[in-house]
Image: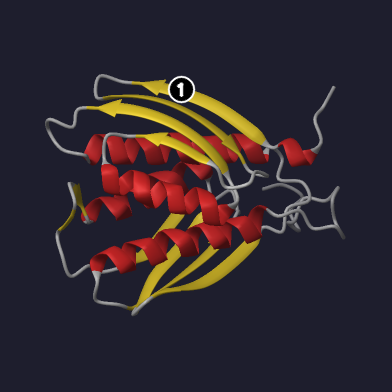
C-alpha cells in the first residue's frame, strides 16, 4: 500500500574510507533534529536547517576529523541531498519553487530554489572569518554544493548584508531551509500534477 504524500521519508547510509553516515529524513515533520557529526558548529547549522524547514532529521556521522572536517561536511551534504531526492519521489503535487529572505541581526541572507531535476549551486556568501569553532567557513559552500548536486535542485544563496560570520552562516542555513520548505510544500490545486510543462522533473 502506498503511503500518502504526507509520509515523504527516506533513510540512507553511506560508508567510505573517509566517513560513515546514517541519515533519516521526513519532509513533513515538525523540525525535530537528532544530530551527531562531531563538528559542533555544523550540528548547530543543521539543527536550524531542520527546525526552519520543518524537516525531521536524524543523522549520525563519523569521519576523519583528525585530518579536517571537509570529508564529513561534504559527505553529509551528499547523503542529505540524496535523501531529499528519494523522499520527493516523482515530485507530484509539489510547489517546486521557493524563496526566502532571512535576517539574523545585522546579517541578511536570501535563498531561492527550483526543484528542477537539474543540479546547480550559485553561492555568493563571503565570510569575514576563516573559522567558526572548528569549522572552516569555506565548507558551507561545499555542503550546499554536495546537497544541491545530489538533490538535483537549483539553489541560489546570497549574502545581502552582514559582518558577523556566525550570523551570516545562520541566516544562510535558515533561508535555504525556508525556501526548501516552500518548494516541497504540496500545492492543493495540483496534487496529482508534476509541476513542469515537460511532465517530468
89 on left or right of 22: right
* Residue drawn at (41%, 47%) of the image: 46
Residue 34 in picture, x, y percent from top left: 46, 35
Which residue occupies 19% across, 51% down? Answer: 133
How packed is label 1: few (under 14 Cα within 10 Å), some, or many (20 or more)? some
Q: Secondary structure at mark 1?
A: strand
Q: Foreground residue, 15 or 29? A: 29
- The spot of residue 188 in percent (x, y) is 85, 57
Residue 179, given in percent of the width and then of the height, sits at 56, 62
Residue sitting at x 52%, y 44%:
151
Residue that appears at 78% across and 51% down: 93
> Which residue in the protein does label 1 denote?
13
Given residues 43 and 74, the one toward you in this image is: 43
142 over 62 or under it: above or below: below
Compared with residue 59, is residue 176 higher up or lower down, i.e. above or below? below
Task: Depth check: give the residue in front, 89 or 38.
Answer: 38
Amino acid at each position: 500500500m502506498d503511503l500518502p504524500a504526507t509520509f515523504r521519508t527516506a533513510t540512507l547510509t553511506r560508508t567510505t574510507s573517509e566517513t560513515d553516515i546514517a541519515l533519516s529524513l521526513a519532509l513533513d515533520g515538525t523540525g525535530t533534529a537528532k544530530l551527531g557529526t562531531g563538528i559542533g558548529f555544523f550540528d548547530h547549522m543543521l539543527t536550524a536547517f531542520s527546525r526552519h524547514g520543518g524537516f525531521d532529521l536524524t543523522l549520525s556521522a563519523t569521519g576523519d576529523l583528525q585530518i579536517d572536517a571537509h570529508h564529513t561536511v561534504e559527505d553529509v551534504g551528499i547523503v542529505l541531498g540524496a535523501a531529499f531526492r528519494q523522499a520527493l519521489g516523482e515530485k507530484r503535487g509539489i510547489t517546486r519553487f521557493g524563496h526566502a529572505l532571512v535576517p539574523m541581526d545585522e546579517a541578511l541572507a536570501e535563498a531561492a530554489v527550483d526543484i528542477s531535476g537539474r543540479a546547480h549551486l550559485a553561492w555568493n556568501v563571503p565570510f569575514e572569518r576563516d573559522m567558526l569553532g572548528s569549522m572552516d567557513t569555506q565548507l558551507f559552500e561545499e555542503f550546499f554544493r554536495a546537497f544541491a548536486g545530489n538533490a538535483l535542485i537549483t539553489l541560489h544563496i546570497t549574502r545581502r548584508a552582514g559582518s558577523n560570520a556566525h550570523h551570516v552562516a545562520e541566516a544562510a542555513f535558515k533561508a535555504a531551509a525556508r525556501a526548501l520548505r516552500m518548494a516541497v510544500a504540496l500545492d492543493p490545486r495540483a496534487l496529482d500534477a508534476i509541476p513542469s510543462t515537460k511532465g517530468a522533473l
